[in-house]
Amino acid sequence: MFVLRLSCNLSETKESVRNTEKRGENKREKGKREGRKTKENIMEKKEKMHKIRNTFFLLLTALIWGAAFVAQSVSMDYVEPLTFICLRSLIGGIVLLPCIWFFDWQKKKKQGEGHGDLQREKESGKLPWWKEKQTLLAGGICGLFLFAANCFQQTGIQYTTVGKAGFITAFYIIIVPVMGISLKKYCGLLTWISVVIALGGLYFLCMNEKMELQTGDVLILISAFLFSGQIMAIDYFVQFVDGVKMSCVQFLTGAVLGGIGMFLFENPQVSAIAAAAGPILYTGAISTGVGYTLQIVGQKGMNPTVAALLLSLESVFSALCGYVLLGQGMSSRELFGSALMFGAIILAQLPDFRQKNH
């Protein structure tokens, strides 16, 4: 009897120990689940803050680029187009140099490399980026497109308003996917509808009551096609070279070509350049250096379509800045054309947006 009772007590003790262990395991499992939920909540909050911050950066980029049209227009009161392009491109290229250093430093930091990198690169025979043939070739070709586009845009902006120049330039957002057909890239139905709407918008924006097409608008439209060519070139070359380094080379290419043209066809005056220093510095340092850097940081982790939509607000900001800073208004006809253009720009982005969210 005593043995039987002892056996029962031992069984109860074992059962109690097992229950205690099970409760402990359940508590630990619950603690792990709560820990995972807490981490997930923290990650979600960080992701939301990241998106809000990046959205702000892209909106700021659009504002900076929109205001650059005002600076371009004002500078024409003091200097000629090629002089402006040369100085703007030179400043832009120089401003990107610290950006290149910073992004390279970040990359090396993530890879856990130390201060002996430069020595190791020399020992391995690796050339510095400014001597890489592929980077120089890519930047040079993109620079040719950019220089030609800037020439037409800078000349055309003398004969049209800032707002119209902004909306017509933004036409490249629609031209690019259509040009992509030559590279066997799919172009959706909504893109073709947006092309038709944009052409209607261009008609109301550029054609006056006398059915005359203004010279400035034609030049800006040509620049939009050249900007499209530049974007297509970047899209191709960025697969093989660093984007920021390529951009630096393309700006310096523009500076060299602009400098040659400036001394051959224009008569640059130091006093005139000094008078236009503000607009030149803004377009060179702020629009190029700060704007480009904000775009790179802002697009990181963002839906490309959403980023394109935010950046397309550049045209709206150009019209607002032209009205506020220069008092350049638009007729009801031009406003209607601008609205059609902006609607077409938004519509051109929708195919990808819908695909990514279904």
Image: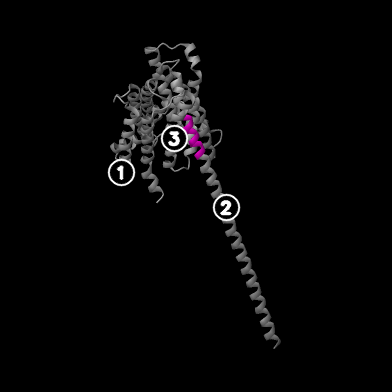
The residue shown at (47%, 13%) is 272
Give the class, few, some or many, for how many residues have Cα within 10 Å of label 1's Cα (few <14, many ≥20).
Answer: few
Pick the residue in front: 161 or 129.
Answer: 161
Q: Secondary structure at mark 1?
A: helix
Label 3 sits on residue: 313
Q: At label 3, which amino acid type do we have?
A: Leu
Q: Which residue is mark 2?
A: 39
Whether residue 193 is visible here, answered yes or no, is yes
Residue 266, position as x, y percentages in the image: 39, 12
Residue 307 percent coordinates (x, y): 44, 39
Numbered badge on residue 169: none
**Which residue reaches farthest bottom?**
1
Query: Magenta stretch?
Result: 55-65
Separation of disc 1 and disc 2 at Cα? 43 Å
User: Which amino acid does the dot numbered 1 rest on?
Assistant: Leu
Q: Secondary structure at mark 2?
A: helix
The residue carrying mark 1 is 189
Q: Residue furthest right?
A: 2
Which of 113/20 is in front? 20
Measured Cα–Cα span from mark 3 to mark 1: 23 Å
